[in-house]
Image (tube, helix red, strand yellow):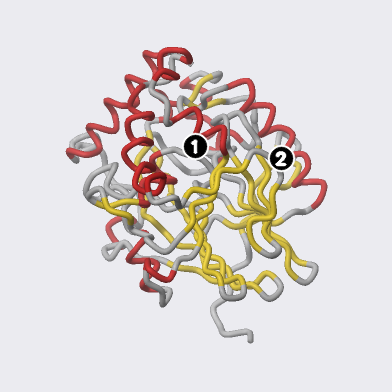
């Protein structure tokens, strides 16, 4: 990935933080209604209660971020989905109640994107009836700002009682600044990773895995390098039901489902990301697998279905009652 693209993205994030990036742009329908920044949605997988937690959403300029597709084609895909560029992208995390363990899949962006851009995870966690101290395990799909940023606040651990489970290749890559020069990947990502992960490293609270591993009873981690070297899926199985938390193999449904070859500026290895996305989409579609996705519209849970052109996203059916 060209260094210029990542420098551009870093600049865009800086504009986000000042609140000036899209000051002249009209908001999409619904944004001004989400005043509290809190949202949760719970469902059961066998005996395990899973709660989707919203960290908020951020605007993304797809003309600057997506590669392997023209601007006109992006706009056409978005128009078909009744969207326009820039698009509003959800940041979702997921809470798993596994026996006496409380596991959090990803932690949102924390303070890294600035006021009003993500950072709502703890409020959503409270709305679900839990505190940060209750979390016993954090399962990171990968070491990027909007997935690990919520681990710390003002340099302190937000989840002091939790063990952080993360792919070892991501730890090896992002916690060594020399890899920025070796790879051409922007130093911004390495600095953030070191800032956020170091308190947990120093406290001995990192469980770095490098192969398929059972993290918790019924929860298995597998590495799928591409987007980052240590990107991981976490699969939950309980009483014949399952859901797989797939991380960032998909960012923009309207564009990347019909054409999985489209990459994004955040991919460390774009060719690897395409391979993982294509293989995973095919497998999930054939197996009718339920998946949970960080950047689909909240709650980000549904199925991937083979379509005439590429794939479709089918969200989970909404329910609002106590079914116990």
- Sequence-wise, the earlier of marks 2 and 1 is 1
Regarding mark 2 in the picture, which secondary structure is present there?
helix
Q: How far from the left and from the top, in percent, is residue 64?
A: 39, 23
Residue 281: mark: 2
The mark closer to the camera, 2 or 1, is 2
Regarding mark 1 in the picture, which secondary structure is present there?
helix
Q: Nearer the viewer, residue 315 or 221?
A: 221
- The answer to whether 177 is drawn above or below residue 97 in the figure is above
* Other residues around mark 2 within 10 Å, as few (<14) / some (14–19) / many (≥20): many
* Tag 2 near tag 1, CB within 8 Å: no
- The residue that appears at 25% across and 37% down in the rendered structure is 16
- The residue that appears at 69% across and 27% down in the rendered structure is 275
For the residues labelled 2 and 1, the Cα–Cα distance comes to 23 Å
Q: How far from the left and from the top, in percent, is residue 233?
A: 64, 46
- The answer to whether 275 is drawn above or below residue 20 in the figure is above
Residue 146: mark: none
**Looking at the rendering, which quadrant does residue 324 occupy?**
bottom right
Tell me: 92 left or right of 191: right
- The residue that appears at 39% across and 51% down in the rendered structure is 203
| Disc 1: which residue | 79
């Amino acid at each position: 990935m060209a260094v210029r693209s990542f420098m551009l993205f870093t600049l865009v994030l800086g504009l986000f933080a000042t609140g000036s990036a899209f000051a002249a742009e009209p908001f999409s329908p619904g944004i001004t209604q989400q005043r509290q920044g809190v949202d949760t949605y719970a469902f059961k997988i066998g005996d395990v209660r899973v709660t989707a937690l919203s960290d908020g959403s951020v605007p993304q300029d797809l003309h600057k971020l997506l590669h392997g597709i023209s601007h006109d084609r992006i706009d056409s895909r978005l128009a078909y989905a009744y969207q326009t560029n820039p698009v509003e992208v959800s940041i979702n995390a997921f809470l798993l109640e596994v026996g006496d363990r409380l596991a959090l899949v990803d932690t949102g962006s924390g303070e890294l994107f600035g006021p009003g851009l993500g950072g709502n995870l703890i409020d959503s966690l409270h709305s679900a009836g839990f505190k940060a101290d209750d979390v016993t395990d954090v399962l990171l799909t990968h070491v990027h700002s909007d997935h690990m940023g919520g681990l710390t606040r003002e340099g302190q651990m937000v989840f002091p009682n939790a063990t952080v489970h993360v792919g070892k290749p991501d730890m090896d890559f992002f916690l060594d600044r020399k890899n920025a020069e070796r790879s051409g990947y922007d130093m911004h990502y390495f600095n953030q990773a070191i800032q956020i992960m170091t308190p947990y490293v120093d406290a001995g609270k990192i469980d770095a895995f490098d192969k398929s591993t059972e993290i918790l009873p019924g929860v298995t981690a597998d590495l799928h390098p591409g987007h980052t070297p240590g990107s991981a899926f976490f699969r939950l199985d309980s009483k014949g039901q399952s859901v797989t938390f797939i991380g960032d193999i998909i960012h923009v449904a309207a564009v990347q489902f019909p054409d999985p070859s489209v990459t994004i500026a955040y991919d460390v290895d774009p060719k690897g990301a395409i391979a993982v996305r294509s293989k995973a989409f095919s497998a999930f579609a054939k197996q009718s697998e339920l998946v949970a996705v960080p950047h689909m519209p909240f709650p980000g849970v549904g199925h991937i279905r083979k379509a005439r052109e590429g794939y479709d996203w089918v969200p989970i059916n909404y329910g609002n009652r106590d079914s116990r």
